[in-house]
């Protein structure tokens, strides 16, 4: 069965050449593999090309109108330039647009500038909690491209100049004419002799070989403000890579990585730490000396403190990055139950429990497995 070429382009059988062209252009914008990576789009684009190839050719269109298929093998037509069902050589999206709009459709073409902005660079900086909290002046080493001082970025040897590229006449691109089903498509490609610059460097600068920049290792000092956090980036304007031809340097980003601290864990600007308190101290109350990041504080643990209690030391955390003030330090108390009691201690605790009316089963007197083990170790039979 003949394919529905009109249907593929979405035009009716009376469509003018202009309507067919417009429909094709619209669909090419939508389905060309250069603009639509979907594999289905690729198949669709093949159909669209085939339909346009047939309907834009009066003789082939006539075959379709008579119920035949000019692209089918033996379908009455001589076949397209690319064989049955084919759409000729692959034509780039930009070339299709150029074929309709003229070469200007591709936007700014022509020689590209030798001087271009440089790339940004990123550097990882490991800091201790103390440094992120209170700020630091950190020495860093950066491997980047800097301006070539021999030629000041021009890329030419002393006393010499750029020359107009003879291959492209200074246009930076060369045109080739392709015969396709669209007719002649003139496409422009960057000139390979001058890499699109339109100029060549007959005598390159001996230091940078014409690049206008050289790679080097620089040492800088970065001022890290107090209160920075893991993952934050500090931007150093124009400390990145100098561009080709001595173009403006990109920025350097210093990414902060905070080393984990032995004692404190950090949540935002708050710090957390754990302190072990004996059961008796928790029951009777006590006074603790807590080392903070930058001071020593004395805090009272109230009598009757429960396990998993928290003390909050205001403004003993990390200083806020912007504005004033600091986060808090949370001291998590681990109330520790004694694991070993000597007979006297055990007796006192039992007496204590008795005075409080608390019932305590006497495991050791029940002759259980563990007490028998203990008796064996203590030499009792
Ligand atoms: Zn050239
Ligand atoms: Zn140079």
Image: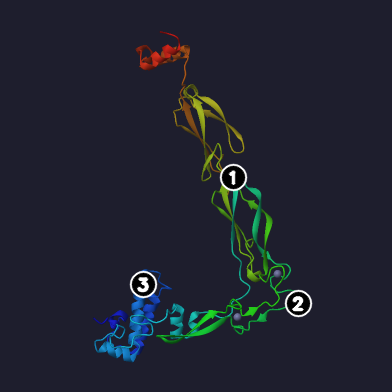
The residue that mark 3 highlights is 41
Mark 1 or mark 2: which comes first in sequence? 1
Mark 2 or mark 3: which comes first in sequence? 3
Q: Ligand 2: which quarter?
A: bottom right
Judged from the image, the secondary structure of the residue bearing numbered disc 1 is helix
Label 1 beta carbon less than 8 Å to ligand 2: no
Q: Position of residue 18 (x, y in %)?
A: 36, 88
For the C terminus, the image quarter is top left
The residue that mark 2 highlights is 159
Question: Mark 1: few, some, or many residues within 10 Å (few <14, many ≥20)?
Answer: many
Quadrant for residue 99, please give it.
bottom left
Quadrant for residue 10, please give it.
bottom left
The residue that mark 1 highlights is 133
Quadrant for residue 73, please give it.
bottom left
The reply to whether residue 357 is visible in this rendering is: no
> Alpha carbon of mark 3 to alpha carbon of mark 1: how far?
54 Å
Judged from the image, the secondary structure of the residue bearing numbered disc 2 is loop
Q: Nearer the viewer, residue 69 or 306?
A: 69
Q: Nearer the viewer, residue 41 or 178?
A: 178
């Amino acid at each position: 069965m003949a394919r529905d070429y009109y249907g593929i382009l979405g035009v009716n059988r009376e469509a003018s050449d202009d309507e067919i062209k417009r429909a094709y252009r619209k669909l090419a914008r939508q389905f060309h593999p250069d603009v639509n990576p979907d594999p289905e789009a690729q198949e669709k684009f093949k159909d669209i090309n085939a339909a346009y190839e047939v309907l834009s050719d009066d003789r082939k269109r006539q075959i379709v109108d008579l119920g035949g298929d000019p692209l089918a093998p033996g379908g009455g037509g001589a076949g397209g330039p690319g064989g049955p069902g084919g759409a000729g050589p692959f034509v780039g999206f930009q070339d299709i647009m150029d074929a309709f709009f003229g070469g200007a459709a591709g936007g700014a073409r022509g020689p590209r500038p030798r001087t271009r902005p440089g790339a940004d660079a990123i550097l990882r900086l490991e800091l201790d909690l103390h440094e992120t909290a209170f700020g630091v002046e950190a020495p860093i080493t950066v491997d980047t491209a800097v301006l070539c001082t021999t030629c000041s970025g021009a890329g030419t040897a002393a006393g010499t100049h750029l020359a107009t590229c003879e291959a492209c006449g200074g246009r930076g691109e060369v045109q080739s004419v392709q015969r396709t089903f669209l007719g002649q498509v003139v496409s422009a490609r960057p000139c390979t002799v001058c890499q699109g610059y339109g100029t060549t460097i007959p005598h390159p600068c001996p230091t940078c070989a014409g690049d206008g920049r050289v790679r080097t290792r620089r040492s800088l000092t970065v001022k890290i403000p107090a209160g920075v956090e893991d993952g934050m980036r500090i931007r150093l304007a124009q400390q990145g890579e100098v561009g080709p031809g001595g173009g403006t340097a990109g920025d350097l980003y210093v990414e902060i990585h905070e080393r984990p601290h032995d004692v404190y864990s950090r949540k935002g600007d708050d710090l957390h730490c754990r302190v072990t308190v004996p059961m008796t101290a928790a029951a009777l109350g006590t006074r603790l000396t807590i080392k903070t990041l930058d001071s020593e504080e004395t805090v009272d643990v109230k009598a009757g403190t429960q396990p998993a209690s928290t003390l909050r030391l205001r403004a003993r955390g990390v200083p806020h990055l912007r504005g004033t003030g600091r986060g808090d330090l949370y001291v998590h108390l681990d109330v520790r139950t004694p694991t070993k009691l000597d007979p006297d201690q055990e007796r006192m605790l039992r007496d204590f429990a008795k005075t409080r009316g608390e019932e305590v089963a006497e495991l050791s007197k029940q002759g259980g497995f563990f007490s028998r083990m203990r008796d064996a170790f203590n030499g009792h039979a």
